[in-house]
Amino acid sequence: MSTEILSDLNVVNRKSAIVSKRRQYADLNIALPIHPIFHDIIPLVDIDAVKSAVRNLILTNFNERPFQPPLGSNLRALLFEPADMFTMIVLKDNIRRVLTRYEPRIDNITIQIQDDTDSNAYLITIGFRVISLDQPVDLSIYLVRVR
């Protein structure tokens, strides 16, 4: 091959690498909404896909997924523990552990937990940054103990 063709190929490869830097995340919507025109399931994209994945990871208990027993944060089991500082520390640690280990699309994780003792519940607010979008996101989850 001539050097002209090789240099042209290198230019094309560099341009395609620059164009493909931004990644779009897509995930299955658990509600399974149907598109009115295409009659297909509408997927979650970008921030909504990452938020859905974070919510699913947090609400998963240990040994709940086949072949992945350590996956999860076991928050439902902690709802039946006494509502004190030690339980909130364990909640934070479990959430941080599952997100740093199993969700590579996010960083800068902040976790705030508010105790609602009268309702036997916790309000968990998780802040994170989606890496490819460089956009901060807040996700709130209200965990209630059901007898």
Image: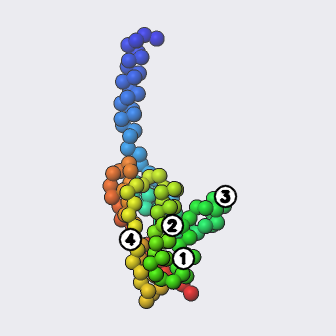
Please determine whether, in this image, residue 77 is positioned above or below residue 33: below
Task: Report, in whole angstroms, how far the alpha carbon at label 1 lies from the one at label 3.
Answer: 23 Å
Nearer to us: label 3 or label 4: 4
As measured in the structure, the alpha-carbon distance from the residue carrying label 1 to the one carrying label 2 is 10 Å
**As drawn, is 73 to the left or to the right of 23?**
right
Q: Callout 1 environment at 10 Å: few (<14), some (14 to 19), or many (20+)? A: some
Residue at the spot of label 3: 67
Marked residue nearer the N-terminal end (3 or 4): 3
Q: Residue furthest left?
A: 135
Disc nearer the start of the sequence (2/4): 2
**In the rendered image, the vertical position of residue 122 relative to residue 24, given as above or below:** below
Nearer to us of marks 2 and 3 is 2
User: In the rendered structure, which amino acid carries the disc numbered 2?
Assistant: Asn
Precedes in sequence: disc 1 or disc 3: 3
Q: Residues within 10 Å of mark 2 (few under 14, many from 20)?
A: some
Of residues 60 and 49, the one nearer the viewer is 60
Query: What residue sits right under mark 2 in the picture?
Result: 94
Task: Give the amino acid at mark 4.
Answer: Gln
Is mark 2 in CB contact (under 8 Å) with mark 4? Answer: no
Residue 81 image point, x, y percent: 54, 81
Residue 35 appearing in the image: no
Specify the farthest residue to the front. Answer: 86
Describe residue 59's horizontal placement relative to residue 62 as left or right.
Answer: left
Of helix, strand and loop, which one carries label 3?
loop
- Contact? badges 1 and 2 (CB < 8 Å): yes
| Sequence-first tag of 4 and 1 | 1
The answer for how far apart the CA atoms under marks 2 and 4 are is 13 Å
Task: Name the residue type under label 1.
Answer: Leu
Q: Which mark is residue 112?
A: 4
- Can you tell which mark lies on residue 78? 1
Q: Amino acid at mark 3?
A: Phe
